[in-house]
Image (cartoon, helix red, strand yellow):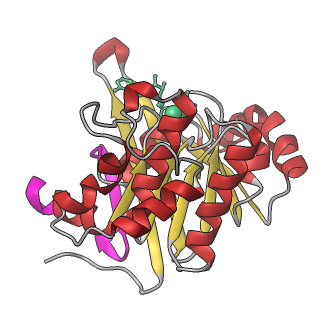
Amino acid sequence: MTVRTAAGEALRLENVRKVHGTGDGKVDALAGVSVALPAGSFTAVMGPSGSGKSTLLQCAAGLDTPTGGRVFVDGAELAGRNEAALTRFRRSRIGFVFQQLNLLPTLDVLQNVTLPLKLAGRRVDTAHAVETLRRVGLGDRLHRMPAELSGGQRQRVAIARALVARPPVLFADEPTGALDTRSAREVLGLLRETVRAHGRTVVMVTHDPVAAAHADAVLFLADGRLVGRLAAPTAEAVAERMTHLGDDAEVQRARTGA
Ligand SMILES: Nc1ncnc2c1ncn2[C@@H]1O[C@H](COP(=O)(O)OP(=O)(O)OP(=O)(O)O)[C@@H](O)[C@H]1O
Ligand SMILES: [Mg+2]
């Protein structure tokens, strides 16, 4: 039986650990992360390169298996399912925008965006897909192939693809990383809207304090540990916090004796 958590909780991590590699190459990418995010919240995750942000998202989305701890998405625990059941669960509940976008090169933009719906055996709402592509500024690129697009355009296709599936929980790894200011603002507006208007939950990794300021709260990660949280963030407050993250990690290490 699948273990469930309290209603209204979109994501719960309990002491999640992840060790990458073996022997001398062993890396504690996540050193015990616990967090609970309510449904209908928009959370940014920040931290230095290598601090474990992508690993955190991959484990939370069931794309990677934690070395220890427990993960609950949309109230249900990820562990204890076979691969097919996990895939079904992901397709119905979880959206993901990767750091490396995996668009299929042989499908055009619109086909890439509607593919997950087809794979999940769901009705394809082409008008909604076209409207979402229009919102991310690709209304005139529906039938281009991925190879004919810029990096930022490809990133927007991946975002449209994730939104069109209307997942209750959406994870986005640096979704605005390759975008100019205006496109980034559009994408952040769309993410906000998916939270505000549709009650979905978004967890977004970003290096940009301005992007993070669009979220309800920012979680700070350093050396695989959560070292801080900032509610109602402003870009200034986030930038200020980022400059002291290294110090926070030191304090945390001293406290835990790690
Ligand atoms: N597949 C892997 N095998 C071995 N080590 C890995 C693997 N993936 C990540 N790591 C290591 O785990 C740590 C955390 O990596 P992760 O990709 O989660 O960082 P990140 O915070 O997303 O960094 P960035 O901001 O550069 O994307 C790093 O030290 C990284 O080198
Ligand atoms: Mg990363």
- Residue 174 lies, in percent from the top left, at 57, 41
Judging depth in this view, the residue of 182 and 227 nearest the camera is: 182
Residue at (34% x, 65% y) in the render: 126
Q: Position of residue 99 (x, y in %)?
A: 47, 35
Q: Nearer the viewer, residue 50 or 94?
A: 94
Q: How many marks are shown on the rendered structure?
A: 0
Residue in the image at 50% along x and 61% along y: 132
Report the front residue among 131 and 159: 131
> Does 206 appear above or below 92?
above
Q: Is residue 80 visible?
A: no
> Split into 4 quadrants, where in the image is the N terminus?
bottom left
Quarter holding the C terminus is top right
Q: In which quarter of the view is residue 107 placed?
A: top left
Drawn side of residue 132 relative to residue 95, left or right: right
Judge from the rendering whether residue 242 lies leftward or rightward of residue 94; answer left or right.
right
| Residue 70 lies within the magenta run | yes
Q: Which residues are magenta?
A: 63-86
Residue beneath the point at 49% across and 54% down: 133
Residue at the extreme bottom of the image, as rendered: 7
Up-down: is 13 above or below 136? below
Q: Position of residue 8 (x, y in %)?
A: 47, 84
